[in-house]
Image: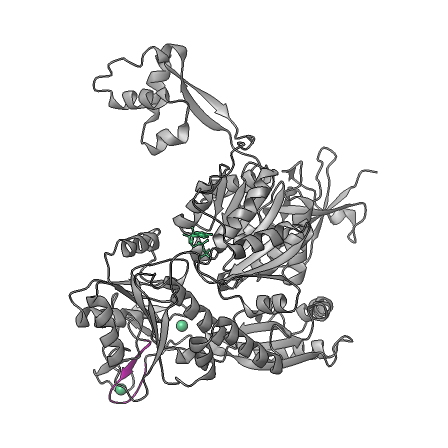
Amino acid sequence: MRPSIARVALPVPLDKQFDYLIPSHLFPIIGGRVSVPFGRQTLTGVVTELTQHSEFPLAQLKAIKAVMDNQPVWPTPLYELIRWCSQYYQHPLGDTLHNAMPSALRKGKVADFATQVEWQLTEQGKNQLMHNFGRAVKQAKVMKRLEHGPCPHQEFIEEEISSSVLKTLTEKGWIASTEIKPKRHAWPKELCNQPADLRINKEQAVAIATVNSKSGFHSYLLEGVTGSGKTEVYLNLIKPRLEQGQQALVLVPEIGLTPQTINRFKKRFNVPVEVIHSGLNETERLNAWLSARDNIAGIVIGTRSALLTPFANLGIIIVDEEHDASYKQQDSLRYHARDVAVMRANKEQIPIVLGSATPALETLHNALSGKYHHLTLTSRAGLAVPTTNKVIDVKGLYLESGLSAPLIAELRKHLSAGNQVMLFLNRRGFSPALMCHECGWIAECHRCDAYYTFHQHSNEIRCHHCGSQQHVIHQCQGCGSTQLVTVGVGTEQLESQLEQLFPEYKTIRIDRDSTRRKGSLESALESIKRNEYQILIGTQMLAKGHHFPNVTLVALLDVDGSLYSSDFRASERLAQLFIQVAGRAGRASKPGEVLLQTHHPEHSLLQSLLNKNYRHFADTVLQERKLALLPPFTFLTLFRAEANNCDDVETFLRQVRHTLEAHPLFDDNCMVLGPTPAPMAKRAGKSRWQLLLQVSTRSLMQKLLMSSRSVISQLPHAKKVRWSVDIEPQDLS
Ligand code: ADP
Ligand code: ZN
Ligand code: ZN
């Protein structure tokens, strides 16, 4: 019998689905979009079930207005994966499905390529190529371009050829347009342009052969320092799969999507390569998505959100720099793209390769325990040599805007040898606080538990947590004194100090403030490569994905914060940053040096990092985590709650705690910590508290959360606060 009711997942913050009647002339399908009335609006949703029965009286149900798809939006395994994400990360299905679609589809557009217009010469036009166009330069340009073959309309728009020019030529009968849809061309026989001089080394060959020797789903960790040839391994793994008509998905961190990376893939293979990132406009994104789904693209390279791209025939997933924090989404569906990628590979029964010089401790643990195959590249494929690493003990030393005298001397040495130097400081702005010299009053954000950062460049004080900003103040609000001084050092101050110290060299600063304009980061990186700047200053933004062969000195200015942080991952992040910058500096003819300024040169983690290697460091930290029952030895869930009223927040989290503890599955393998005020206890005027659940296995954590979920959302205080659940949080603030 024909189903009479469709259950629809809608993009609303409610964790349930809605029943609609199916009019006799409409044929909705599971996994396809429909448009439905919802309150006074019309929404686009996804059908999750077709049925005869509803818990509601039929008379109360409204009818579907329109059906948008006659095939599901996602292939079955991907649709199941998205449903799994919604469950695992405890996010409403409707919103999860909604966000997994390109925005054009969310708005109800057709899930098919728009036809494109293409221009070409007519027979008559071909005889006019020698025609003298005189002052009709644009007409001449069009004819000249078409002499070489058909041209998409888009290209003429980009060349600023007006439609009147095209119209005139059409009326003369010299050119004509046709409408075309992109279609899948068979990939050429000669797929791969491997350079002849590039011989895979032994370790690379072992890695490639290991992955190729197994079929079905397997996870691999490819551990190798920067320049050890990981990308070369990826390319060699992709090749045989393309030859069999399969596609490849390559995930890179947000900042890693540089033209160089993309070009390497494009140059190597004669297949369409689609690039997916947040900068695409709606049409570009839809086209990239369709091109993967319809088997036109051979390779898709993209950041986190590219993970949920549909493929006709996916053959392998690569996650480069798998330790990178940008793989974890920090709001709405708080998924970890690396972890979900492993799940996807499992569902699609294909291999997944996680590459890094500094694997996340979770990944390393999986490799050491045999869950993942562990592949290593130990030698640098290029000519680079290891750096010399040193600490500068700054105890008792005078710091000039964060710089110690020994560091300044080193900078001078490297600069006068004609090299570039790079300085890292993870704090933007001029100084992290503005203080009264007479009474000690500090300019504090009224809405947050935080000081204002002083930005000299814009002459403002800004709160980096709620975004509030105001013109800089010149008078103390405590005692009225005008003697306001800056406290602490940010990248802006470091920059102006270095400009004063080294006026004969050019400095450039790379942080979120200096790279706001689209394309400004790329052009800054290019000018660094061209040696236009000698002193490079940045937050960790500068560390990722770029190789600067002329940099011979790298300095990390303030590592103490990471050694003694309340976030247990801070030391892991410091180690990753350190190895990464060390990997970027120098080459054979110009050996690199890395300096760390610290008050704690004897700290065991620093010593292990400097004198041993990342693995030694990681082993030490893994042992500590094991003793402390921290990930990867346990699994965490962080409940966050905020409200104007501090009592409401605390009460709600107390109720959550009781709910969890009263659960029949809650046993010695589970522990709840809190509620406690969040590290930043007030933000944008709201009180913030948190509660941490620690469970010894993932499956127990899942079961516990799944069956507590509806109880928690119906707790008496759940409506009084804004709350969220973060499964396996990466950031505990
Ligand atoms: P990673 O991805 O680990 O940073 P790449 O694959 O980018 O390393 O390799 C670093 C450099 O070494 C590149 O210029 C690459 O072309 C080169 N390279 C990689 N493998 C080899 C090899 N087997 N022989 C010669 N050069 C290689
Ligand atoms: Zn004062
Ligand atoms: Zn604030």
Dominant secondary structure, magenta: loop
Which percent across, then down, holds residue 541? 38, 63
Above/below status of 160 relative to 82: above
Above/below status of 617 relative to 48: below
Image quarter in which the N terminus is found: top right
Above/below status of 198 relative to 633: above
Nearer to us in this view, 203 or 655:
203
Nearer to us in this view, 185 or 619:
619
Q: Count the marks: how many?
A: 0
Residue projecting furthest to the left:
504
**Residue 443: within the magenta?**
no
Residue under the image location 51 percent in, 41 percent down: 288
Residue 117 is drawn in which quadrant? top left
Query: Would you say 712 lies left or right of 132 here?
Result: right
Whether residue 723 is visible, yes or no, is no
Residue 693 is drawn in which quadrant? bottom right
Which percent across, then down, holds residue 651? 61, 80
Which percent across, then down, holds residue 399? 26, 82
Give the colouring mode of the picture: one colour
**Residue 438: within the magenta?**
yes
Whether residue 209 is visible, yes or no, is yes
Query: Would you say 30 lies left or right of 253 here?
Result: right
Residue 692 is drawn in which quadrant? bottom right
Which percent across, then down, holds residue 130? 28, 13
Tell me the magenta residue range: 432-442
Nearer to us in this view, 149 or 409:
409
